[in-house]
Image (tube, rainbow, N blue to C red):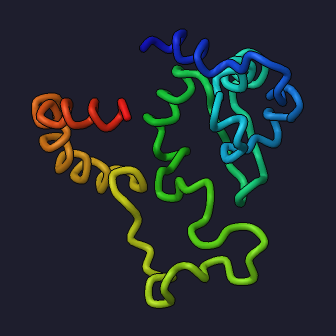
Amino acid sequence: MTLEQQKEQATPKGNGASHQDKDWETDYDIFDPAYVKNPFPVWDELREKCPVAHTERWGGSWMPTRYADLFAIAQDFQHFSSRDVLVAPIGSGPGSDEPYEDVPEALRDYDVGAPPITSDPPVHTWARRLLLSPFSLKAIAKWEPETRELSAR
């Protein structure tokens, strides 16, 4: 399915809530049910009006929306580190008295990250190399029939 087909399929056909009811440029919420169901209008609008959105939700984060910006950021790890990429904290989330009550106490200060996602070079480089072979096209091809069967359910 092409991106245009996905957009068409996800676009509501009635008078549902619109992404335009929110200020996505300065207060985006990637957990908003309408966004989760159909993020395409939000991304289209942000690319046009505000290619790098920001929010203070979940401790604050930035959301670049254009490929060229994302590519440049990924290459510039001196200014844009990947060591702290979580948008939402682990644990119970907002409104909880104890932000990590769902995480065992022994693990609360265990900050190992998840390389290569949460690392910069040189750690990112060796971690990525470890994953290249098991996730190559040839290696994952054997999972295609089962994946298609599961996704068709």
Vertical comparison of 53 with 29: above or below: above
Q: In which quarter of the image is the C terminus?
A: top left
Vertical comparison of 83 with 21: above or below: below
Q: Residue at x 36, y 30 (%)?
A: 152
Q: In which quarter of the image is the N terminus?
A: top left
Vertical comparison of 125 with 143: above or below: below
- Residue 78: x %, y % from top left: 49, 46
139 sits to left or right of 47: left
- Residue 60: x %, y % from top left: 72, 54
The residue closer to the viewer here, 96 or 108, is 96
Vertical comparison of 52 with 88: above or below: above
Q: How many labels does the image show?
A: 0
69 sits to left or right of 61: left
The residue closer to the viewer here, 60 or 140, is 140
The residue closer to the viewer here, 34 or 71, is 34
Q: Looking at the rendering, which quadrant does residue 86 occupy?
A: bottom right
Seen from this angle, which residue lies furthest right?
Answer: 21
Q: Residue at x 72, y 44 (%)?
A: 32
136 sits to left or right of 86: left
65 sits to left or right of 82: right
Q: Residue at x 80, y 28 (%)?
A: 19
